[in-house]
Image (spheres, rainbow, N blue to C red):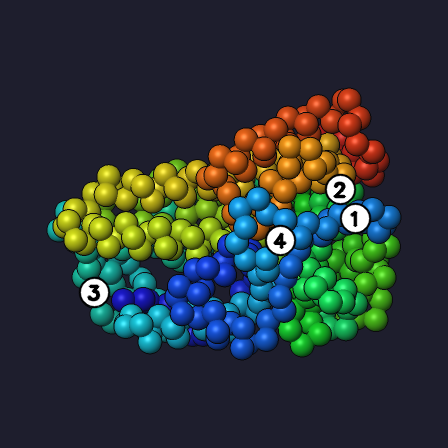
């Protein structure tokens, strides 16, 4: 049984999928429907400095581990509705506009109060997103002190974009204090947003004036959005990154953003949700077969999610240090380090040895680059980092 507080379709951020999502979408039986929805194909991630003078494209086809060479840039209202409808067709009892008001976890089962009904089950899965109902009740949420960031974002029509295979690329624009995402969507619409440390606000409010001023201050963004018009309100989010200190317990599991949310620079949110959902489903199926519902029954799921989350969180933390951003703009093919980064950007290899040791070596080179100048400097990025450290 799936209890959904809202009624679909509804707006949700997190529009850029990773290539690793294609296989689970195929397994769910929804890949044809996703293709038919007309979402742009995303063949690469591109990093660009704010003035547009330097850029580096990471084609997903260069991943060490193979897999799909593309992903999708999706409107989450339509994409999520496809998944929800598919769950109902597969036999799930889907109840929309049905808010869970309370729950109890006991030795012999779980009890949920939703609407006017009291429902009983063997296992409770918390997929309530950043609301994270169980983590809130059990006081499990832990904010990441290194990633106390804010985001401000909207949708525009008429922004310029690439051609051919690059038309659907996500672009990460490196600016003084943070980064902007530029995500081409269907129908000549573009999602654009700024993510930066809360200190970077310097007393300002992340409102429409702040947002539009930031767009204008980057020559690269100003050129791409010169003829564009805003189609949606300015939205904000804060205290972006967190994880739960416990991801499963007796008769319950946390999945997706309810378990953890990582700064979205590498678009890992949907990947963790999809991959985690498959891992959780396998653990629950085994628990139902064995009639064992203790936390130990879900240990494999918890280990997988913790390991994958940690791999992305460590790389995201490093991204905010100028020496890593410089290395991303000037990567090396030695020892296939660029290909390892591409694998991580594709969502492949967070638990693969061939990728992990190379990512660790990439991080070593980034630390050395802080003082040894292994790459050309991004002076504005370094200046902004020094100022934020001093605040």
Q: Residue at x 59, y 71 (%)?
A: 39
The mark nearer the N terminus, 4 or 2, is 4
Image coords of residue 59 (percent x, y): 67, 53
Q: Which residue is mark 4?
A: 61
The residue under label 2 is: 329
Q: Position of residue 23 (x, y in %)?
A: 46, 59
- Give the number of the disc on residue 55: 1
Up/down of 234 relative to 341, above or below: below
Q: Dot 3: what SS? A: strand
Q: Is residue 162 left or right of residue 239?
A: right
Q: State the residue at coordinates (81%, 37%).
A: 378
- Residue that numbered label 3 is attached to: 119
User: Depth-wise, is mark 3 or mark 4 nearer the camera?
Assistant: 4
Marks 4 and 2: which is nearer the front?
4
Dot 1 and dot 2 residues touching (CB under 8 Å): yes
Residue 283 is at least partly visible in this image: yes
Q: Nearer the viewer, mark 4 or mark 1?
A: 4
Q: Is residue 161 above or below residue 204?
A: below
Q: CA distance from mark 3 to mark 2?
A: 53 Å
Q: Position of residue 239 (x, y in %)?
A: 56, 46
Q: Reading the chain from its start, which is encountered first: label 4 or label 1?
A: 1
Mark toward the viewer: 1 or 3: 1
């Amino acid at each position: 049984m799936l209890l959904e507080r809202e009624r679909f379709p509804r707006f949700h951020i997190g529009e850029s999928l990773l290539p690793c999502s294609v296989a689970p979408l195929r397994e769910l039986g929804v890949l044809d429907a996703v293709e038919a929805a007309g979402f742009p194909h995303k063949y690469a991630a591109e990093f660009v400095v704010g003035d547009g003078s330097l850029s580096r494209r990471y084609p997903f086809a260069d991943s060490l581990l193979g897999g799909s060479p593309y992903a999708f840039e999706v409107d989450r209202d339509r994409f999520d509705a496809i998944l929800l409808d598919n769950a109902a067709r597969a036999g799930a009892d889907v109840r929309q506009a049905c808010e869970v008001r309370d729950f109890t976890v006991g030795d012999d089962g779980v009890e949920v109060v939703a609407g006017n009904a009291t429902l009983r089950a063997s296992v409770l899965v918390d997929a309530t997103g950043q609301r994270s109902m169980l983590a809130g009740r059990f006081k499990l949420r832990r904010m990441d002190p290194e990633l106390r960031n804010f985001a401000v974002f909207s949708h525009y029509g008429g922004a310029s974009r690439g051609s051919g295979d690059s038309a659907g690329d996500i672009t990460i624009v490196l600016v003084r204090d943070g980064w902007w995402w530029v995500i081409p969507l269907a129908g000549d619409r573009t999602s654009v947003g700024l993510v930066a440390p809360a200190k970077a606000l310097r007393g300002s409010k992340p409102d429409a004036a702040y947002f539009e001023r930031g767009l204008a201050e980057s020559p690269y963004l100003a050129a791409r959005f010169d003829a564009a018009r805003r189609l949606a309100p300015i939205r904000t989010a804060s205290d972006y990154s967190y994880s739960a200190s416990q991801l499963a317990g007796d008769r319950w599991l946390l999945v997706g953003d309810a378990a953890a949310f990582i700064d979205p620079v590498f678009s890992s949110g949907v990947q963790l949700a999809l991959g985690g959902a498959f891992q959780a489903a396998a653990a629950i199926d085994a628990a139902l077969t064995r009639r064992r519902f203790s936390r130990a029954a879900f240990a494999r799921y918890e280990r997988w999610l913790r390991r994958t989350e940690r791999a992305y969180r460590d790389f995201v933390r490093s991204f905010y240090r100028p020496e890593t951003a410089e290395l991303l703009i000037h990567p090396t093919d030695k020892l296939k380090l660029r290909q390892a980064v591409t694998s991580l950007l594709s969502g492949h290899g967070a638990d693969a040895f061939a990728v992990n040791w190379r990512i660790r070596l990439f991080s070593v080179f980034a630390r050395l680059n802080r003082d040894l100048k292994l790459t050309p400097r991004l002076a504005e990025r370094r200046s902004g980092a020094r100022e934020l450290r001093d605040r």
